[in-house]
Amino acid sequence: MTLATGVGADFLRALLQGTPPGTVYALVALGFVLTYKTSGVFNLAFGAQAYVSAAMYYKAHTEWGWSIIPALVLSVFVLAPAIGLTLERLVFRYLRTGTSVAKLVVTIGISLALPNIFELITNFKGVVGRTPAGIVPNGAGVFYDPFGVYPFSRDELTTIGVAVFAMLCLAALFRFSAIGLQMRAVVESPRMTELNGIRSDRVSAVSWALSSTFAGLAGVLIAPRFNTLAAPDFFNLVVVAIAAAILGRLVSLPRALAGGLGLGMVISLLGTFLPRWVQSNPWLRPFQENLTPAVPFVVLFGVLVLWPAIRRSREVSDPLSGVDPPISSLALATRSARSHLIARVVTVGALGTVAAIVYFRADASWMFLVTQAVIMATIYLSVTMITGLAGQISLCQGTFAAIGGFGVYQLATLHGMSVLVAAPIAAVIAAAVGAVLSLPVLRLGGIWTAVATLAFAFFFDAVAIKFSWVGGGNTSLMQGTRVPRPVLGPWDFADDRAFLVLAVVVFIIVSIVVVQIRGGTIGRTLRAIRGSEVAAQSIGISPARARVVAFAVSAAIAALGGALLSIHQKNVNYGSNFSPVSSLFWLVLVVSLGSRTIEGAALAGAAYSIFDPLILRGTIFGWILRSPDRVPGIFPISPKWRLILFGLGTLQFARHPEGAVEYWRSRTARSLAARQRSAPGTPEAPDAPNESDAPNGAVTS
Amino acid sequence: MKSNLIKCASALAVLSCLAPACSNSESSSTTTAAAVTTTGVPTSDTGGSDPSTTDAPSDRDVFKPITGVPGVSDKEIGYAVIGTRSNNPLGTCILDCYLDGIKAYFAFRNSEGGIYGRQLVVNQEIDDELANNQARALDIVSNNKSFGSFNATLLSSGWGDLESAGIPTYTWGIQPADSADRLHIFPSIATMCSGGCTSHLMPYAAKSAGAKHVAALGYGVTENSKTCVAGYKNSVTKYPEGGVDVAYFNDNLAFGLPNGIGPEVTAMKAANVDFIATCMDLNAMKTLAQELHRQGMDNVTLYHPNTYNQQFVTDADPLFEGDFVSVGFLPFEADTAGTTLGDFLTWMEKAGKTPSELAMVGWINASVAFGGLLAAGPEFDRQKVTDATNALTADTAGGLLKPINWSTDHAPYTDSTRPADKQGECVTLVRVTKGKFATVAPPATPWMCWPSIEWSDPEFKGFK
């Protein structure tokens, strides 16, 4: 059949060419909506769930030689619901009344951990060029051309059919069935549902099994589009598909389907017509160069910022949420002055000892790691600022750090400025970017702020670093993005020890700034806003101003840390350090350990940098056994464990949003107080301050 | 608010005052180029031959006690190998295949008695997990138990530290920016022209395919890909003798082609494109070939920059039939006479390993390391080996590479700063024929060389 010609035919062809990728986005968007409707979770782990089923299907069908049906049953109808049930039982059951943000953070952790758990258990590894097979025989090799314009493969037609059928079935489920109604009711308020005699646990379990099965099915259907099966591709797909899901405000299945298809078609139409328009209108070329790869992120950001309905559909509120106890106050507030003093002396002593050992004994490798830990802790203070203090989730802290890195590269390497001057200037630039970004983003609130910042991170990754005034352009081809170490008077920071001291000084200064802000007007304002935004406004507090300041300061801190990291590594190393996914990992680390305290950031920095060599590579056992040769043979442990352990660390966050550090500190303080009270003749310990002294999520240490 | 502004202004003023006192360390990149010039590697009088393949010098078997040289004992010379195994997003075999080649080479040389009475060994195998190259490189610097290092990694953040530590480092040459102007770093491909440079090869391949209308495709997100595609375009413009024009150009594709490549293929079809040169990864090449097949363009010839992977091509057969693939070294399909290619194939077989691109890179790197040792003499140390290697002016790693002049080839250049000795070029090219690679030039003389920057038919050569 010959292809039709003309603009109309080109338009139709472009629509059809956008249909297969659009269907993929639609499938993921449907999965998002399904999970959100049935569990209230904005499930960033959807891609990980889909990947695991796709990989299981590949392993069973391609590697083990199973036929399609048993492989499909195993991967989609056994493994996928089992994963869903496990997640519900171990994680989300405890989060049912948690905030959307808490659930979001947990799904980020799961998205990091789940693929690695699967790969470790099954020893699965994607191989280049081994395209996964679809669920119909010869699905990639047989084509049908229903319109005589553009042929579809059998796999693609199957995927389109399944997506439409699934949408209809799910819509019917929610509209006409009792279980569909119960699922939505449990999301709205599990307690009220139980008052009506419905077992919310069971309904929730069904919801998770259903949504996970759908994720598995989507994964198996999507997999043939990838010529190497790899988890990051599925995560990137999720980020793109969020735009489609949001078009349906996370509740409308038909809109999500239409959004996914529309997204694919818009990208295809731009790919078809934009180059033609550029030929007659050269001024459009920058748009072609920069817009094309960033369409999904621009759409996502645009929808979030410009569509008022999104802002109105913040979070589902449970009418009985008032019965929840408030988040625990900081441990410091519940400790006696004596135990506080002891803890402080012990901490300072321990840190001093470690610092002395590192300074005088560490080799180049440990010096590098410890310095990196200090710098990462500085960057993580930006999370303390925006998440711990302002209560917002930002998923673009890596991007701000990258602005810092590229800032020093541009100013120091290309324009001859000292990096000591360039770094603060880069921080100021990032603060300005952060402030501008915060204006549209922060009024969204909750998960929408997180998603908008994620879109910004991917936009920066796809577009901004291409600009020569950011990533260096042609110049970076010759010598990369190398960054020099500074010299300040008699101090040459090319010496690693001197640079460690500089990093520590910067960390201390930034920590003091954060503590000062926390205790100052802005900090109190932010706490008031977190307590009750309406009440805060009623007494004349401007939430917008406080949040913009918090976002800008947070961006500046991240950029300062990013600049320092680039100077430390003598290269920006964007791919290693600042990719959008890095922000997710950072957030998971910090909130798991404690996003409200300086100690949380410091420990997160140490965990990021030192956990791997110390624990996974077995170095600590070498020290204990006094010889690296005596390290047990099981070391080094697979680096996948790092993502697994830190990813699963968010489960701790699910139950204790104050973070592990605060949780253990509070627990210790409570047990000490109890021991003191029970000791005969001991005067009664001072009363713990009223909970209201430290409102939810406030950082007061 | 006003006081805040004053504070900010004060801070900036302080910073401005600090500026004269601040500068950047001497080890900065801005001084590196000067360092290269001033430290200038002396050109060897004996340059022009590859010590690893010439008749073994008489002192190769001479044992001289050496003390205080890291990684060197009376019995062994130890090397560290860093590569990417975990988290490799491409799904390709990197570290393990690279190790295969290095170990095969060491086994080959050790079977001859090693060098200076010592065996060559890999004493550290390190997975950099994609993002930890610098930390792993510093491990090598710190434990200081290897004489040199080999490095095959997708992100090469640690090369600067190995350079600073003076450790001879042999690398997979896909990161020219990170090896540029670093005298201890020896990539498997000499530092090349950067930034949209012209080449005879693509127009020649298009002409050989009988093509008339060329398309050039690349990713927008990486500067390497963009300038690579620009190089294709510039080459076609520069060499009209190739008889092709650029009918379609797109350097803005999204990495990995997540949305497919349907509209672009349709546009190429409308432009009567019959030859497509790309700067994309293997998976994207397969996606492109699948879309060409879907739209009935099976007869279009592709020019692949990095698909020299027989298994990959076999798995995709017949999608790549008739396509050209550029190779950075002597292809496996070439005649082995006079080179160490036969040794490579033999020793890989002895080890029970399959020849692969990364194995060959490992073999080449090991060969350069061995050549440096040989040139340094029996009382060697790291600096002597680096200096001796940099004195080689025509190193072919046993006939596997075009001659590299290490005294000058650390320095990158552009089309406009192209040195006099870089006016010509030598390349190898294979074509997929019945699912297998075959050299475009005669197998006995597989290198296609252009003596000058002017257009001409290539001379077919072989190197010893």
Image (tube, rainbow, N blue to C red):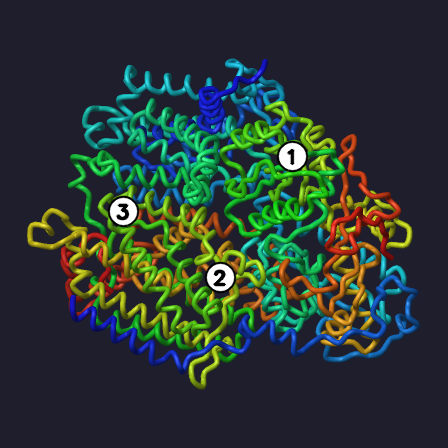
Q: Nearer the viewer, residue A81 or A148?
A: A148
Q: Is residue A665 visible?
A: yes
| Figure quadrant of the C terminus of chain A | bottom left
Q: Position of residue A686 (x, y in %)?
A: 16, 66
Relative to A647, A155 lies left or right: right
Q: Nearer the viewer, residue A465 or A495?
A: A465
* Vertical placement of residue B386 versus A115, above or below: below
Q: Position of residue A365 (x, y in %)?
A: 55, 69
* Residue at the image position 27 percent from the left and 68 percent from the top: A513
Amino acid type, callout 3:
Val
Instruction: Identify the residue under disc 2.
Output: A572
Q: CB under 8 Å between callouts 1 and 2?
A: no
Q: Is residue A127 visible?
A: no
Please tell me in which quadrant of the rendered image residue A224 appears.
top right
Q: CA distance from mark 1 to mark 2?
A: 40 Å
Instruction: Identify the residue under disc 1.
Output: B213
Residue at the extreme bottom: A490
Instruction: Identify the residue under disc 3.
Output: A441
Residue B65 disc label:
none
Amino acid type, callout 1:
His
Relative to A267, B231 lies left or right: right
Secondary structure at badge 2 equals loop
Q: Position of residue A139 (x, y in %)?
A: 59, 21
* Vertical placement of residue B399 versus A206, above or below: below
| Figure quadrant of the N terminus of chain A | top right
Amino acid type, callout 2:
Val
Relative to B350, B412 lies left or right: left
Badge 2: chain ID: A
Residue count near mark 1 (Cα–Cα under 10 Å), binned few <14, some 14–19, many ≥20: some
Badge 1: chain ID: B
Q: Position of residue B208 (x, y in %)?
A: 76, 37
